[in-house]
Amino acid sequence: MTPDIPKSALQLRTLVTSTGTLELSLHEVPVPAPAANQVLVRIEASPINPSDLGLLLAGADVSAAVVTGSAERPVVTIPLPEGALRRLSARVDKSLPVGNEGAGTVVAVGSSAAGNGLLGRTVAAAGGSMYAQYRTIDASSCLLLPEGTPARDGASAFVNPLTALGMVATMHQEGHRGLVNTAAASNLGQMLVKLCLEDQVPLVNIVRKPEQEELLRKLGALHVCNSTSPSFMPELIEALTETSATLAFDATGGGRLVSQILTCMEASLSASANEYSRYGSTTHKQVYIYGGLDTGPTVLTRNFGFAWGLGGWLLTPFLQSIGREAVAELQARVAGGLTATFASTYTKEVSLAGALQPGALATYAEQATGEKYLIAPSLK
Amino acid sequence: MTPDIPKSALQLRTLVTSTGTLELSLHEVPVPAPAANQVLVRIEASPINPSDLGLLLAGADVSAAVVTGSAERPVVTIPLPEGALRRLSARVDKSLPVGNEGAGTVVAVGSSAAGNGLLGRTVAAAGGSMYAQYRTIDASSCLLLPEGTPARDGASAFVNPLTALGMVATMHQEGHRGLVNTAAASNLGQMLVKLCLEDQVPLVNIVRKPEQEELLRKLGALHVCNSTSPSFMPELIEALTETSATLAFDATGGGRLVSQILTCMEASLSASANEYSRYGSTTHKQVYIYGGLDTGPTVLTRNFGFAWGLGGWLLTPFLQSIGREAVAELQARVAGGLTATFASTYTKEVSLAGALQPGALATYAEQATGEKYLIAPSLK
């Protein structure tokens, strides 16, 4: 250990108590020495992704947040809704670290050869506990960033880029010829627009606001449908016919959007069918739910035949399914495009303590388009 | 052609008119000579399966049926609900034959060798147009029944037996260790109970009435849950834990049953998990909808993590997916068990004209447990 590494440092923790309260706070935890195959990373940038919010906020209503403690060590408490403890039973009274991904400088390495080339370099990594000042990580899990890349540029090198690449890979694997994405003006959605243009994958983007339509068209998106438009269904059918898209990724989950997408896919396929089939088109239509912006129930009208599937989609099992080598190839592609195709933009950079301020909490919990927070744990 | 084969014979037809009426009637159609690779079958028994009703009734409300014509040549007309024509556009003004499967005697054969061994024998077949007195069929598609088997015993040798076998095969293919079936007291459900006992496949049966519970327990079913019971959910969780069933086949489609099954599977899996995962269990839970007894929307509460799938399941694509040889193996198994594991029972045998009488229509359209009709086209 070099002398400028402290013995202990801050880590953000989330705790659901058995009395029904969510508690967010900063803990002073020991900075461990890296094991043989590990490196110690000083985390300098870690994004707040929608996929972090489930663990961080446990479904609590942030408008009821109360902040106590000092400015440097705030403690947020939020009462949990009735019945929430049953759903959360496995995490009750366990103080849990948060943060799916981040980037920073390797300040110490273990004894294995793998780590040595990384000392002093900026790396990106995923795997949780990134809302912290320091973290040890397997050297083999680190994505070495090109010399001179600021940590900020590598902070979001895993979740969104690999999800976008995973969507396109899933499309190829499952034999589809085009994609649909919802909540398509998100950071991930914008990345998918750029990636699909680069890979010549036909993409239908579904958004809810005119300014989101405009944003995506400016990026070069060819097919953008607004689900609040009275002509949404015929417009979606037309876009599906033009793209032959039979695979959709849905970030909203609840409501009727999934059903509408399947209905429009079926309508597009039936329009080109020659013969009546009481079971509908034989072409398989698939929707994967990968988020839950709408936590209400998913309502399916089932007027889309029998050749359809719906399911959950998560990045981690997808990466496990394709194997280490394929993942390494995807990561290499991301590393080469961090300031272009896979660039993320942030509206705000906050310290660990800053992430626990009421205004910040309220903003990132809302998951509004164009509002993306970056935690810089070394900021005071 | 031998002299006892008529030049023309009766065929039941279903017609959706452009004026919004469903018309069911008997047509006198030419009896064709079999082509080289075909045989001509005198159809003697053909069941009315739930899977026939979509084509036959086009969603019409049979309580509004009006029957005109003679007793031998009834004509049923039923007004279709507002808006039905859009959904049915591909079949408007096309008179369509009906009847997925049936059995009868081979009365003439084509010139190819394959057909010759079949002359005079009783065969079962599937492929539509079975509600008719005669039908030509590819010799290779015929299931030759054991010498002396009455046509009645072979009438349902395809749809239900192959569906039950297909469910078990899908379970093995997709790596599940147990099955759930809904509307489990149906003819198919009873067959599945017997098959699963024979193959030692753990099976959870979901029914809605005490007498259905009793019926299945008498057949030897170990796990029967009544979805109308106040303790349905805990009972289902217990049955799922005992069977490790993570694959369900659902005949109802609409309502919350699919969601309840996924929720209970997740609860059963989480109970044995050691660690909290914000994304739920990593074990994949799957439900296939194969019927539509409840035509209302499917409502999913999505409190079952991300490792789940839902989709349509149909027999024909399943059979296509496993290939000819595998299908032949399944059919051989069915042929050997037609009076045991794969036996069907019928409450009523009617002529083609009898199938168009109001009382019969009302009964088989209701798809009540234990009410199964057999059409015997040679009956007057």
Image: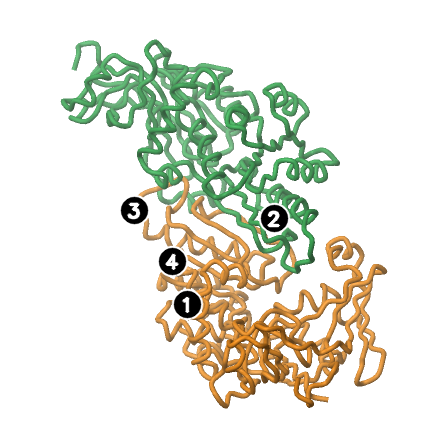
Chain colours: A orange, B green
Q: Position of residue A256 (x, y in %)?
A: 56, 56
Residue at numbered disc 3: A274
Q: Residue furthest left?
A: B111
Question: Upstream in the sequence, badge 4 or badge 3?
Answer: 4
Name the subunit of mark 4.
A
Asked which secondary structure carries label 2, the reply is: strand
State the CA–CA distance, disc 4 to disc 3: 21 Å
Q: Determine the residue positioned at 46% across, 64% down.
A: A324
Asked which secondary structure carries label 3, the reply is: loop
Q: Position of residue B201 (x, y in %)?
A: 54, 31
Q: Between label 2 and label 4, give the one nearer the viewer.
A: 4
Q: Determine the residue positioned at 44% across, 34% down.
A: B166
State the CA–CA distance, disc 2 to disc 4: 27 Å
Quarter of image, res A351? bottom right
State the CA–CA distance, disc 2 to disc 1: 28 Å
Q: Amino acid at mark 2?
A: Val
Q: Between label 4 and label 3, give the one nearer the viewer.
A: 4
Name the subunit of mark 2.
B
Residue A203: which numbered mark, if any?
A: 1
Q: Quadrant of the N terminus of chain B?
A: top left
Question: Upstream in the sequence, badge 4 or badge 1?
Answer: 4
Name the subunit of mark 1.
A
Q: Between label 3 and label 1, give the one nearer the viewer.
A: 1
Dot 2 surroundings within 10 Å: few (below 14), some, or many (20 or more)? many
Q: Amino acid at mark 1?
A: Leu
Is B102 left or right of A160, judged from the image as shown?
left
Q: Amino acid at mark 3?
A: Asn
Q: Nearer the viewer, residue A274 or B175?
A: B175
